[in-house]
Every structure is written in C-alpha cells, then in structure tokens.
C-alpha cells in the first residue's frame, strides 16, 4: 500500500512552509515540490543514490575536487554515497586504505596503467595475463611509448633479471588466466621493491579474500567485482585498493579526467551480492574441488589445473599463501581429441552454459586454443576452462560424465 498524507507537512521547517505560500505554478512545482515523504526511514539496505549534480550550500562552497572524502560531495562522477559505500566495504575486506570503484574489472586495469605509467617507462606482465590486459599493453601502452616485457608467471625471484632502471610496474595475476599458474608474489615483490618498481596484483580469482595482497608485498590490488562480489552475472564493476596515499592521488587524478564512473545501481547490486559472498564462496569452493578431483581421476584427462591440486603449476605457493580456493579451474585433455571433439564435449554439456566471465551462480565452460600462446602452446586446443556454480556438484559430475562419453 502506498499512501500520501498531508500530515507529512508536520516535518517541514517554517522556511519550507513559507515557500509553499509563494503560490508556485504547477510547472515549477514539478521541479521544486513542497510536499515530501516523511523522513526517518531506516532499513538494512544501502539506498541507491543517483545523481550527477551535487548541491552546494552556497556559492563559496562550489568546487570540482574529486577526493570527496576530504572535501565532501562535489559531483556524481566521483561517487554517490552508494558508490562510496561499496568502496568502503571492499577496502575493509581487502585491508586497504583507499578503494576506487570502476565501471568493470578491465576499467580498473586500464586506470591503474594509465595512472602509474609514463612514456619511456617499462612494465612487466606475465604470459598468462587476462587477455584484454595484454591487449591494452600491446595496443595502447606501446602507442604511448611504454615498453612492455612479458615474463613466465613462475619466474619468482628471477624477475630481478628482467627489471630495468625504467621498470615502474610489475603486474601479477595469480592464479593466471586459463592456465592457472600460482605466482610467488612475495619473491616478485621483494625483487621489484629492491629496484623501486611497484607491484600490482589482479586478485580476482580469490575475490580479494583468499590471498591477502598487502601482507604479501603488493602495492596495488585490483579485482573484477563483476565476478564473486556482484555474484549473479548481472553487473560489471571493478575495484582498485591501495594503502599508499600518493598512489591513490595519482589514480584519483586520472580517474577524474578519464571520467569512467560506475552506475550507482550496479554498486547497489554489488553491495547486495557482498552480503552472501561468504556462503557462496564456501559452497562454490568445495563444489569446485569435488568436481576437479573427480576429473583428475578420469582417463581422458591429462591434468587438472586447479590451484588446490598438486597438479597445478605453482600449487606450493597456493598452499603457502592462500587460505582457500574458488570456483574457476581448467582441464587439459590427453593428446588425441581434435579441436572439434573438444568443442563437441563442451556442446554436449547440459548444465554447464558456454560463456565468458564467471563468479555467478551458474556453471560455465569455455574451450580455448593456446597453440600460439607464448609459454603455453603445449596445451594447444586441449584446454577447457570450467567455472563451478551453485548447482548440486554430483549432478555437474554426471553432466561431465555424459559429455565425456561424446568424444
Ligand atoms: C582475471 C580477470 N581480471 C579482470 C577481468 C575483467 O573484468 P570485467 O569483465 O569486469 O571487465 C576478468 C574478466 O573475465 C578476469 O578474468
């Protein structure tokens, strides 16, 4: 039932009542109404504050500064209370000092690189980096005069040999995309810091939870909130978390001029998703492990690239540094099936949908051909990435079993 009663005037100040007496036309009243809902509503839900224009109390207060924590609200582009509430929650979760929310995980990646690199600088990126991130390095960064070197993800302390005087960033992604190598991030951070380079980590796989980035020497942490935090495949958001104020200011100054603000509606959905992140991650993690272990025992499978299994490259670093595992892993077929047969396996799956992105409630499968991927070509067309959602794991196993029978 929705009821409006004039008794709500009881809440209005004498000044507003005076304005009512000004006899506005109906057209003006459409913009400057005098009757309002009663105040004092409290609920468990963060409201969706939308707004481009932010109202200032007087002419002297007008400013266009982006750091609204310091100067108060100035413009919707720099975050409404919904956006900043999400930033605060992510920041707490990741144990940072400052968090910036972006419109998508890739937006977080590009904001970091465009903020922290200048022409003439050098960045090191791992071979198994998220595809669009590699593309950013080779298409945009190189065009702006940034030197890019690709390194093997398991290089560890050996990264020291690749660091040059102009190396500003060492990018880590652990576990890496598709082939899931777990990196020795502390060893990389030690070598990078010895030469004055910053370490950035794409911590999306662990949702910022299972790997405490700042405890392991990372300077800038990002994750795609699109995945586990939002958790329902209906939102694109990213987060960058830092402890250092000077880095935060570089990011904030660039964010302001790039102008890529997230939608407060999406932030509200992410805040809602965050409340169930704990139970979802626990279920997804245990189901994924159960399915991965079943697959590891199948005669068709050469290896299962799941960080919590010893067969995964870098598993020892997962065991040392991580406190849990999530839902994304890959399988590699033994030599034999053609690319078409691997595709037939994916097509035969009934519960697993075919699609990019992950972290939602539905299980997904995507096959890849890495025949031309540097450092990973041995996997060829035999690799399939699986994401395990919230379905009953025994039914997912039955689905995989029937699909394996099709190749
Ligand atoms: C490891 C990793 N980082 C970043 C991203 C980018 O996130 P978004 O899809 O929100 O742009 C993805 C997306 O798949 C990802 O897998």
Image: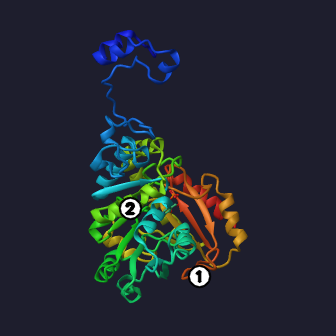
* Residue named by callout 2: 251
Q: Residue at x 51, y 15 (%)?
A: 26
Can residue 406 be seen in the rendering of this structure?
no
Answer above or below: position of 211 versus 333: above
Q: Residues within 10 Å of mark 1 (few under 14, many from 20)?
A: few
Q: Residue at x 53, y 72 (%)?
A: 134
Residue 295 position within the rendered picture, expressed as x and y whole percent measured from the top left? 53, 66
Would you say the beta carbon of the disc 2 residue lies within 8 angstroms of ligand 1?
Answer: no
Q: Residue furthest bottom?
A: 161
Can residue 48 be seen in the rendering of this structure?
yes
Question: Residue 219 appears in which quarter of the rendering?
Answer: bottom left
Q: Residue furthest right?
A: 340
Q: Is residue 389 left or right of residue 35?
A: right
| Quadrant in which the C terminus is drawn | bottom right
Question: Residue 162 appears in which quarter of the rendering?
Answer: bottom left
Q: Is residue 404 left or right of residue 62?
A: right
Residue 185 position within the rendered picture, expressed as x and y whole percent measured from the top left? 35, 75
Q: Of the residues tagged 2 and 1, which is closer to the observer?
A: 2
Marks 2/1: CA distance? 38 Å
Q: Residue at x 49, y 80 (%)?
A: 148
Q: Nearer the viewer, residue 314 or 197?
A: 197
* Residue named by callout 1: 378
């Amino acid at each position: 039932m929705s009821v409006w009663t004039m008794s709500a005037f009881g809440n209005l100040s004498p000044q507003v009542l005076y304005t009512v007496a000004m006899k506005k036309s109906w057209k003006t009243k459409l913009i400057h109404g005098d009757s309002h809902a009663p105040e004092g509503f409290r609920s468990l839900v963060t409201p969706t504050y939308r707004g481009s224009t932010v109202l200032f109390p007087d002419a002297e207060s007008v400013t266009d500064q982006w750091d609204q924590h310091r100067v108060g609200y100035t413009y919707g582009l720099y975050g409404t209370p919904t956006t900043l509430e999400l930033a605060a929650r992510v920041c707490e979760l990741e144990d940072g000092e400052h968090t910036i929310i972006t419109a998508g995980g890739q937006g977080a990646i590009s904001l970091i690189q465009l903020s922290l690199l200048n022409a003439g600088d050098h960045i090191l990126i791992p071979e198994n980096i998220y595809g669009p991130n590699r593309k950013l390095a080779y298409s945009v960064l190189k065009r702006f005069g940034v030197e890019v070197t690709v390194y093997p993800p398991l290089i560890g302390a050996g990264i020291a040999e690749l660091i040059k005087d102009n190396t500003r960033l060492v990018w880590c992604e652990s576990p890496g995309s598709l082939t899931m190598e777990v990196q020795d991030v502390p060893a990389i951070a030690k070598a990078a810091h010895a030469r004055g380079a910053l370490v950035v980590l794409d911590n999306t796989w662990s949702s910022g939870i299972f790997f405490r980035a700042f405890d392991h020497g990372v300077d800038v942490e990002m994750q795609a909130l699109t995945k586990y935090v939002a958790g329902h495949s209906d939102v694109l958001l990213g987060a960058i978390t830092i402890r250092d104020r000077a880095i935060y200011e570089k990011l904030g100054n660039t964010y302001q001029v790039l102008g890529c603000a997230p939608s407060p509606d999406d932030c509200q959905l992410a805040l809602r998703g965050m409340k169930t992140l704990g139970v979802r991650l626990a279920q997804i993690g245990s189901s994924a492990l159960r399915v991965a272990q079943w697959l590891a025992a199948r005669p068709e499978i050469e290896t299962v690239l799941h960080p919590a299994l010893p067969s995964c490259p870098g598993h020892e670093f997962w065991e040392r540094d991580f406190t849990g595992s999530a839902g994304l892993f890959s399988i590699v077929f033994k030599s034999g099936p053609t690319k078409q047969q691997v595709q037939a396996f994916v097509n035969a799956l009934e519960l697993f949908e075919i699609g990019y992105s992950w972290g939602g409630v539905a299980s997904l499968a995507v096959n890849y051909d890495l025949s031309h991927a540097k450092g990973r070509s041995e996997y060829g067309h035999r690799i399939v990435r699986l994401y395990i959602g919230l379905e009953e794991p025994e039914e997912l196993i039955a689905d995989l079993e029937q699909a394996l029978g099709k190749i």
